[in-house]
Image: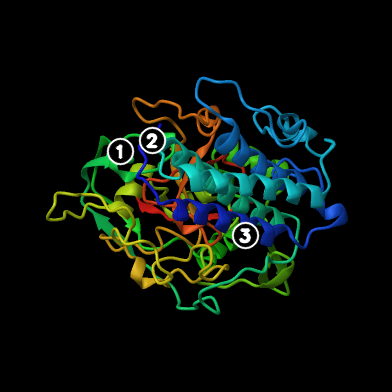
């Protein structure tokens, strides 16, 4: 299990309360048929997902004891309803789920009991680890819930923001040159809570490379679309072309052309593309095809992490930054993360978040596809939540950096996200490297 930096009980409680407030804000306006929604492979029924985050918190913070049987749940048949490792996705619409009010009551009961336990035992190592696990798990589901609202065309969630509007600051062209050399990919034990797939730092050798200072923009991707990028077989890998033909893709999923102008649907609003915002809702195949068209390539995840985290030697010998800008806890001026704008910003915005080599928005705005398949690091060992990483090794691609819907406390330069290469519901874009 990951080493744990001891949190005061009030900080642990704050993590849980913040995640729960967001869950409620994302779901409070749902009713009737929208509590289940259509049966799609890329979404969960909202009513099921709300109950699942409560079940997960109860499982790890109240019921789980290493080496012992699980204690009973507060909710009869909770495991049969909400255990995502054992409840097939396609069956979740048919389950005898409690109603919305009863589900919220279950979540509240669980939270109250966990907060009581924190008050009694908050500085114990194991409880602190599992409270963080539950809070971060709920935050990840909140982000996924945001994807669901976009996929289903629901209204944008009403969420507080530190900035009143998306900064429109223009493009940020050009490359940052990185010297390469030996780089320690992954997290170190002193980092505190990290997921098992980040463990542990190991030396990799990187050749010198040049990486874009910013993600690919809507205007840049539109040039690829207009140059018949979606119909030129030579630009696509075999699997990508097969995917493109299967869905008859001719542009990113939410792009609509009217009167010669590209529009984009965001939640339930359709508006003209913002030219210098990063392209979003493109999958790995689309990103790869663009790179071939542009004479570029996707960065490896080691290159991405090196551009984000270092090398930037300090007097104390530290050679990697926790965040692109350094060690300071993320502030609104650093990155477009959850609660800052809650919509996309132009790629040149957030100048305070530049990495040592000069890359901007390595955290926030859009997740960024990398070239690599999601694989374990050397010496990988599962954490107690066994289903988090291991089932997905080998058939998912790695994304880095977070997006405008990602809570800041989830992220660090070593954080690895992963999705299958055909997924374009994710708030994902990409940046490129020179060949």
Give left or right: position of 160 versus 366.
Answer: right
Marks 3 and 1 sit apart, C-alpha to C-alpha, by 31 Å
State if disc 2 and disc 1 touch (CB < 8 Å).
yes
Marks 2 and 3 sit apart, C-alpha to C-alpha, by 27 Å
Residue pointed to by mark 3: 21
- The local secondary structure at tag 2 comes to loop
Residue pointed to by mark 1: 189
Q: Is residue 420 visible?
A: yes
Q: Is residue 290 above or below residue 354?
A: above
State if disc 3 and disc 2 touch (CB < 8 Å).
no
Looking at this rendering, what residue extends furthest in the right direction? Answer: 32
Q: Is residue 300 visible?
A: no
Label whose residue precedes the other's in the sequence (2 or 3): 2
Give left or right: position of 363 versus 90.
Answer: left
Q: Residue at x 26, y 36 (%)?
A: 204
Expressed as whole percent of the image width and height from the top left, the position of residue 25 reads: 67, 62
- The local secondary structure at tag 1 comes to helix
Q: The N terminus appears in which quarter of the rendering? A: top left
Q: Disc count in the image?
A: 3
Q: Nearer the viewer, residue 325 or 429?
A: 325
Q: Nearer the viewer, residue 171 or 394?
A: 394
Marks 1 and 2 sit apart, C-alpha to C-alpha, by 7 Å
Q: Nearer the viewer, residue 288 or 375?
A: 375
Name the front one of labels 3 and 1. 3
Label whose residue precedes the other's in the sequence (1 or 2): 2
Q: Is residue 366 above or below residue 274?
A: above
**Label 3 Cα neighbours within 10 Å, binned few <14 / some 14-19 / many ≥20:** few
Q: Residue at x 60, y 32 (%)?
A: 63
**Label 1 Cα neighbours within 10 Å, binned few <14 / some 14-19 / many ≥20:** some
Expressed as whole percent of the image width and height from the top left, the position of residue 17 reads: 57, 56
Residue 2, numbered label: 2
């Amino acid at each position: 299990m990951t080493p744990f930096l001891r949190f005061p009980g009030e900080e642990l409680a704050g993590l849980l309360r913040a995640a729960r407030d967001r869950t409620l804000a994302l779901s409070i306006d749902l009713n009737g048929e929208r509590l289940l929604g259509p049966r799609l492979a890329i979404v969960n029924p909202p009513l099921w997902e709300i109950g699942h985050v409560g079940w997960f918190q109860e499982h790890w913070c109240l019921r789980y004891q290493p080496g012992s049987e699980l204690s009973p749940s507060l909710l009869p048949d909770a495991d049969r309803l909400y255990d995502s490792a054992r409840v097939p996705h396609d069956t979740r619409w048919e389950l005898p789920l409690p109603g919305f009010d009863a589900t919220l009551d279950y979540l509240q009961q669980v939270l109250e009991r966990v907060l009581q336990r924190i008050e009694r035992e908050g500085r114990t190592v194991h409880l602190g680890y599992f409270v963080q696990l539950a809070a971060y798990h709920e935050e990840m589901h909140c982000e996924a819930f945001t994807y669901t609202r976009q996929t289903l065309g629901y209204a944008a969630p009403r969420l507080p923001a530190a900035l009143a509007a998306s900064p429109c600051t223009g493009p940020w062209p050009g490359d940052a040159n990185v010297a390469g050399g030996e780089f320690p990919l992954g997290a170190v034990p002193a980092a505190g809570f990290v997921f098992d797939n980040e463990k542990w730092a190991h030396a990799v050798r990187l050749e010198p490379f040049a990486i874009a200072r910013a993600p690919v923009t809507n205007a840049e991707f539109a040039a690829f679309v207009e140059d018949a990028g979606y119909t030129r077989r030579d630009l696509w890998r075999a699997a990508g072309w097969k995917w493109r033909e299967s869905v008859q893709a001719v542009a990113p999923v939410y792009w609509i052309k009217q009167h010669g102008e590209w529009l984009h649907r965001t939640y339930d609003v359709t508006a003209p593309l913002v030219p210098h915002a990063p392209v979003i809702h493109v999958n790995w195949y689309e990103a790869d095809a663009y790179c071939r068209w542009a004479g570029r390539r996707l960065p490896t995840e080691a290159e991405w992490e090196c551009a984000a985290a270092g090398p930037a030697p300090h007097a104390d010998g530290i050679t990697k930054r926790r965040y692109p800008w350094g060690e300071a806890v993320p502030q609104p001026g650093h990155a477009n993360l959850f609660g800052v704008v809650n919509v996309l910003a132009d790629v040149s915005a957030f100048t305070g978040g530049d990495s040592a080599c000069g890359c901007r928005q390595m955290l926030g705005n859009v997740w960024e596809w990398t070239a690599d398949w999601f694989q374990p690091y050397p010496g990988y060992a599962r954490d107690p939540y066994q289903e988090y990483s291991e089932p997905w090794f080998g058939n998912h691609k790695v994304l880095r950096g977070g997006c405008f819907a990602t809570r800041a406390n989830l992220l660090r330069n070593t954080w690895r996200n992963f999705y299958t290469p055909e997924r374009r519901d994710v708030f994902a874009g990409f940046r490129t490297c020179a060949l």
